[in-house]
Amino acid sequence: MVFVSKLITFTMLSASISLASAAPSFEVEAICRTAIASIMGRDPKLMQVTLTADDVLFLTYVRPMDNFVWTYRCRIEGNRVVWASEPGRWRDDPEDDEVFFEVVGAGKQLLIIDKHRDGSSTKQSFDRDTIL
């Protein structure tokens, strides 16, 4: 009886892990575009990756009202998004906000979490079809 119970538990855990790993993930480009757009209050589809150098992505945003081009840099460290304006410094100082991402909703949504230095946080969820 104990063996059967352990077998059922193992089978349920295996199925759970298989479902989690089968969930679609987001590419680094989509994560960076979405994180920068969230920080800047923009539509992720308007952010374009223009260059990738090693683990750094360069992104641009063209402001529609005057066609001014804004450029940012982004890299992923685990589930943290580290970014910089171009030119500008990386936002990785202990005094900077920390930006994280999570894939939620069975892989259908990307959650961007901006942890502010005052202890508060801002969370914004993006559906896959609004990003890609």
Image (cartoon, rainbow, N blue to C red):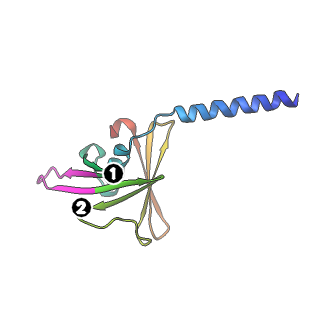
The residue positioned 46% from the left and 61% from the top of the image is: 121
Lateral position of residue 7 relative to residue 78, left or right:
right
Pick out the residue farthest to the right. Answer: 1
Residue 14 drawn in magenta: no
What amino acid does circle 1 point to?
Asp
Vertically, is 46 above or below 98?
above
The picture places residue 101, in percent across and down from the top left corner, at 45, 50
Vertically, is 91 above or below 37?
below
The circle drawn on residue 86 is: 2
The picture places residue 87, in percent across and down from the top left corner, at 23, 64
Pick out the residue farthest to the left. Answer: 66
Quarter occupied by residue 123: bottom left
What amino acid does circle 2 point to?
Glu
From mark 2 to mark 1, how far is it between C-alphas? 17 Å
Query: Mark 2 or mark 1, which has the lower sequence index?
Result: 1
The residue positioned 48% from the left and 37% from the top of the image is: 107
The circle drawn on residue 54 is: 1
Residue count near mark 2 (Cα–Cα under 10 Å), binned few <14, some 14–19, many ≥20: some
Q: Main secondary structure of the magenta part?
A: strand
Label 2 sits on a secondary structure element that is loop
Q: Which residues are magenta?
A: 58-72
Residue 38 in view, yes or no: no
Quarter in which the N terminus is drawn: top right
Viewer-proximal residue among 49 and 105: 49
* Eye-nearest disc, 2 or 1: 1
The residue positioned 32% from the left and 37% from the top of the image is: 132
Residue count near mark 1 (Cα–Cα under 10 Å), binned few <14, some 14–19, many ≥20: few
Residue 70 in view, yes or no: yes
Label 1 sits on a secondary structure element that is loop
The picture places residue 15, in percent across and down from the top left corner, at 64, 30
The residue positioned 46% from the left and 34% from the top of the image is: 24
Lateral position of residue 117 relative to residue 46, left or right:
right
